[in-house]
Amino acid sequence: FCTLFNAKYLPRGILLYKSLKKNIKNFHLYIFAFDELTYDYFKKLKYKDITVISLSEFEDKSLLKVKKLRTPTEYFWTCTGSTLIYLFKKYHIKNCIYLDSDLLFFSYPNNFFNQFKKYSCVITKHNYSAKYDQSKTNGIYCVQFLFFKNDIIGNKILMDWRKKCLAWCYNRVEKNKFGDQKYLDLWPKKFKKVLVVNHLGAGLAPWNIQDYYIFKKKNNIFIKKKLKKKKFELI
């Protein structure tokens, strides 16, 4: 897994790590620290399952060139695809899942992750409720949980995404673009071996939680989709 954040999101990043620790065995988390406080915090802890990467290690000339033209948030978005490219090149890992730092795991459903073996890229929908639907402006898919395989197709998608984000990645809607996110709308049609996740527990968020019932049973949290065919999934 990998994630990126600065000190503002440090408490969320810590909770993300703890949720991984609680639910997943034999994982490794690469943290791209976007300030010294975050870098120093994790470097001092010396966790065996964490590798912390500083901006000085990660940033290249192309990123530094656009950095001064973007707000901090826009620069985070600009860098997402580049983090995965960096990991594939430096650490030669076979695959990696990018996680937003404010994401939390409640369980590790093996049937969900086992699907990924056949694909080079896995993306999740916003699944907006009708009240909050911003699919047309903010995109169908959400840059919150992204699986990439270090293969020809996976790297082709990442390089295409990086190129587009370097050219344009702003916190506004413009010519069918929004941040790093609207670019994902084309991936299922443009590239092969892209899986769109249909697991009910993937991507629960303030913009869709209204559509679900949530309940606890034997220390497990379950969700049920409202007003549709009954379907329960462990999250």
Image (cartoon, rainbow, N blue to C red):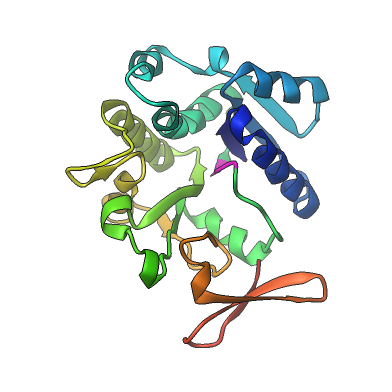
Left or right of 56 on screen, residue 142: left
Can residue 93 be spotted in the picture? no
Q: In percent of the image, x 57 and y 38: which residue is there?
A: 94
Q: 144 above or below 14?
A: below
Bounds of the magenta segment: 96-101
Left or right of 28 on screen, residue 137: left
Image spot of residue 188 (x, y percent): 33, 55
Residue closest to the eye, 92 or 221? 221
Q: How many marks?
A: 0
Q: In percent of the image, x 76 and y 70: which residue is there?
A: 220
Residue closest to the eye, 129 or 80? 129
Image spot of residue 20 (x, y percent): 72, 48
Tell me the quarter of the picture where residue 95 sits.
Answer: top right
Image spot of residue 224 (x, y percent): 58, 79
Q: Main secondary structure of the magenta part?
A: strand
Q: In percent of the image, x 42 and y 34: which residue is there?
A: 77
Can residue 40 be spotted in the picture? yes
Q: Specify the quadrant that holds the N terminus.
A: top right
Q: Specify the quadrant that holds the C terminus.
A: bottom right
Q: 6 above or below 223?
A: above
Q: 149 above or below 132?
A: above
Q: 165 above or below 157?
A: above
Is residue 103 inside the magenta stretch? no
Q: In percent of the image, x 31 and y 49: which residue is there?
A: 191
Image spot of residue 42 (x, y percent): 74, 25
Residue closest to the eye, 129 or 106? 129
Q: Farthest left residue?
A: 175
Tell me the quarter of the picture where residue 169 sits.
Answer: top left
